[in-house]
Amino acid sequence: MKKFVLAQILLLCSQASFAAKAQTFKLDAKASKATWEGRKLAGAHQGTLQFRQGSLHLEGGKLAGGEVVIDMTSLKNTDQEGDMNAKLVNHLKSDDFFSVEKHPTSTLKITKVEQTGEKATVNGELTIKGVTKPISFPAEIKVEGKRLSAKGEMKVDRTLYGIKFRSLKFFSDIGDKVINDEFTVGFDITASK
C-alpha cells in the first residue's frame, strides 16, 4: 500500500513539474511586426506584413515549438508612393509572386529550437502558396514573466515556392531585369500567457 501511495505522489509531482515547465504564449498580432525586402539588380523594395495569429510553446523556459500565421493580404510597400506603390503591391499579390487571392496566409511551424541564453537557431517548416519547405534562421528570444519577445530575420528562396518571375535560374536572357531569388522577412514578435 505504501509503495502504491508513494508511486501516486511521485506521478503527481512529475506531472506538476512538467506542467510548470511547459507553457504556451499567444502571439499579440497587433503588437507584433513583420518586414520584407526584395532586391533586384537596380535596387530594392521594402514593406510590411501583419501577423494573423500564432502560439509559441516553451519547455523549461525555452522556446520548443509553435506556429505563426502571416496575413498575406496585409502586404504593403513602404519605399514608393502613389501609382507605383499600388502597381508593385498588386503585382506582388498576383500569381507572378504570392497568389494572395488563392493563398491569403503563409505559415511558419516551429519544429526545433537550439537555444543558448537569448540566442537561438530556429528550425521549422515555412508554407508559402501552399508549398511547405524546411527553413532555419537565427533569432533572439527573451522570456520575462508572462511576456515573450522574439526578433530575427529569415532568408527565403522564393523559387522553392514556385515564384519564378524574373529569376535567373529560369530565365537566362532577362539582363538587368533580374530579381534576386532570395528575399528577407524580418520579425519582431510579442506574445503573452
Image: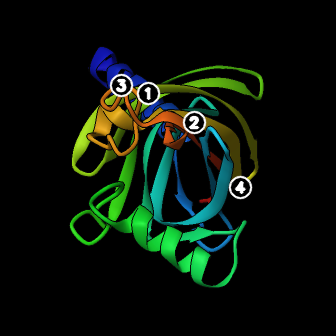
Label at residue 154:
2
Left or right position of 50 against 169 = right
> What is the spatial separation of the Cα atoms under label 1 and label 3, in whole angstroms?
20 Å
| Amino acid type, callout 2 | Met
Image marks 1 and 2: residues in contact by CB distance under 8 Å: yes
The residue positioned 55% from the left and 38% from the top of the image is: 176
The residue positioned 37% from the left and 26% from the top of the image is: 172
Q: Residues within 10 Å of mark 4 (few under 14, many from 20)?
A: some
Q: Is residue 25 above or below residue 102?
A: above
- Give the image location of residue 181, x and y in percent: 47, 33
> What is the spatial separation of the Cα atoms under label 1 and label 2, in whole angstroms?
8 Å
Q: Nearer the viewer, mark 4 or mark 2?
A: 2
Closer to the camera in the image, 42 or 112? 42
Q: Residues within 10 Å of mark 3 (few under 14, many from 20)?
A: few
> N-terminal of the two: label 1 or label 4?
1
> N-terminal of the two: label 4 or label 2?
4
Quadrant where the N terminus is found in the figure:
top left
- Give the image location of residue 188, x and y in percent: 69, 52
- Give the image location of residue 43, x and y in percent: 69, 46
- Determine which residue is flagged by label 4: 147
- Determine which residue is flagged by label 1: 135
The residue positioned 35% from the left and 46% from the top of the image is: 165
Q: Please say which color scheme the image uses.
A: rainbow
